Amino acid sequence: VFPLEEKLVPVVCPYCGVGCRLYIKSLDGYPRGIEYAKDIPGISNENGKLCPKGNAVLEYLLAKDRLKKPLKATEQGKFVEISWSEAIKEVAERLRAYSKDDPNAMMFFGSARTFNEPNYLIQKLARMLGTNNVDHCARLCHSSTVSGLKAVFGAGAMTNTYKDIEEANVIFIIGHNYAETHPVGFRYVLKAKERGAKVIVADPRFTRTAWFADIFLQHYPGTDIALLNGMMHVIIKENLYDEDFVRRRCVGFDELARTVEKFTPEYVEKITGVPAELIVQAARTFATAGKGVITWAMGLTQHTHGHDNVRLAATLSAICGYQGKEGCGVSPMRGQNNVQGACDLGVLPNVFPGYQAVTDPEKRKFFEEFWGVELSGEVGLTVIEAAHAIEKGKVKAYYVMGENPVISDANTNHVLKALQKLEFMVVQDIVPTPTMEFADIVLPAAAMLENEGSLTNTERRVQWSFQALNPPGEARPDWWIVSEIGKAAGFSGDGARGFRYTSPEDILREINACTPQYRGITPERLKSNLAGIHWPCPSEDHPGTRVLYKERFLTPDGKAHLAAVDYRGPAEVPDEEYPFLLTTIRYVGHYHTLTMTGRSRALVKRWPEPLAEIHPEDAERLGIKTGDWIKIETRRGAYPVRAKVTRTVKKGVIAVPWHWGANVLTNDALDPVSKIPETKACACRIAKI
Ligand code: SF4
């Protein structure tokens, strides 16, 4: 008997978009612990440190309820185990039948929690079956970032990297509890602050991030347009903008100046609740710093005006000349660890990989020749639109890979009602989820650390994560499952014309061939460079790109298209019946819908339950004390939760963590451009139970 050797396998944390590296100690594929990656220069967690989630990364993998065999639902509503060949055959035959009769009766939900390769494959499968009905969770978190930045700069991604945050002289954090949602990334803000940089935080809630602010702007949820216009009013009036940059590289300045004219600090104070003098101070501090970064997350994006919020944040950055140079830029922080990659690889209803529009005949022709099939030029459905289409009987089949819409979508009572109407549903996941209850076929997937492939963090850094552990039972990698279904559905041609892959490397090479931004990011390069490569990377000898837009923007005329937007608030505002304004928040120790962190004893012990934050004056009026059970009610549903009486929120505002199911309350009213639902602001009432 030979002693087994313990290996240190380099992986990427499967949680948030910071994309921290760590080593898994693996003994013949079994976990023996983790090791900090202190010896890899240039990674996003340079000193190897991890946050509480990263430190607890092994726990959910060992959960007793991991899915280990394919399952089929019986008529009695139970699941029975079936073989992989039975499962693949049934899924492929059913999808093929819809493809023949009515391809748009199918909807595919990709996942920001799996690698680039299976994401590329799920959209390829949907499109080869004849539909562009494919989307993923970016719709619910950053679709407005993608559309808003595309409108102003021509592309929807972070324009800089963490290094630029560290080198900035001012960092404006809006709608982003950076210290809790991206804890390791927040270290770059702290490093900048140690150097003397100023930090401005705008948030409806006094968060852990706000503790580090030099200027804190506590605005009412949904009043971002007024706040940003107010800052630009001061900057333009006091001539603090970068005139030369605006003249050379921007269009639309005159209209912007006209639009923000009425947004005096006093007028903006009335809308936002932020004192006028603080708005002036923030504007002056931001515009005069020389090097500035704006960062945001869902507090800015999840609104019916999310697209315009993002356009205004980008416009503020541009008029100050904070584009195309180091120490500057805009940094939308992606939530899940591969949201950027899933967007890049075309898991969106309107674009092929590399943001190439399905409506563009030339792009479509390229993919028709590449994949060897005729493709639809009709923009597909988003996930929220799909729920409505299911309810109307237009979408009949739903393939959900690694997502949990029953908890994550807005207005989940509506989602529950809709899913009951489906004819056929496939759920591919690592553990049972509430969404799985509606499935006809369940496909057990290997988790990220039991599998390998590339993924793209929030700063466009593409990294390879190696397989450290054995998957449990018969669980299989996502890329393998989708490939088998693709082949069984009849796509068995060679190369890009089929699904005959033998490894994720095969798939990444195909991505290199059809995705301009990833052209030079080959598996060989990624495997030998653990710090990864920032796209765009147009060739194999290109080092990757740290700062975008040094010469020109990606708009057709190469200029930044400044936004001029008048104020509009949330779709639903407080009234007599529902007098409070509800917003949703996240905890540092939990992630998404708890499918992973909810299976970690350490994290659940520290963050056992949601607490609804309520201002002391409101609490006193309603006789509520910390720890009391209250019922929050909106026009869509009711949610029982315990209260925390605190001054973190303004009078009239309630903040509730969404991980446990608070989306039963939220509003699924959509931003007209990005189609993101407004989960960050709606009217509610509360009562002590
Ligand atoms: Fe993982 Fe994000 Fe925490 Fe880093 S900051 S350890 S990527 S959850």
Image: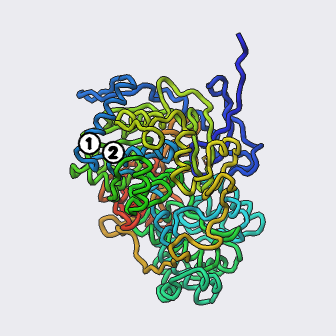
- Residue 455 % position (x, y): 57, 46
Tell me the residue that label 1 is attached to. 98
* Residue lying at 57% horizontally and 76% vertically, measured from the top left: 316
Q: Nearer the viewer, residue 160 or 367?
A: 367
- Residue 453 % position (x, y): 57, 40
Q: Secondary structure at mark 2?
A: loop
* Residue lying at 60% horizontally and 83% vertically, measured from the top left: 246
Find the distance from the CA under tag 1 to the CA under tag 2.
9 Å
- Residue 586 can be seen in this image: no
Q: Is residue 493 above or below residue 558?
A: above
Name the mark on residue 146: none
Q: Nearer the viewer, residue 179 or 140?
A: 140
Tell me the residue that label 2 is attached to. 129
Lateral position of residue 303 relative to residue 24, left or right:
left
Q: Is residue 55 above or below residue 293?
A: above
Q: Is residue 352 above or below residue 426?
A: below
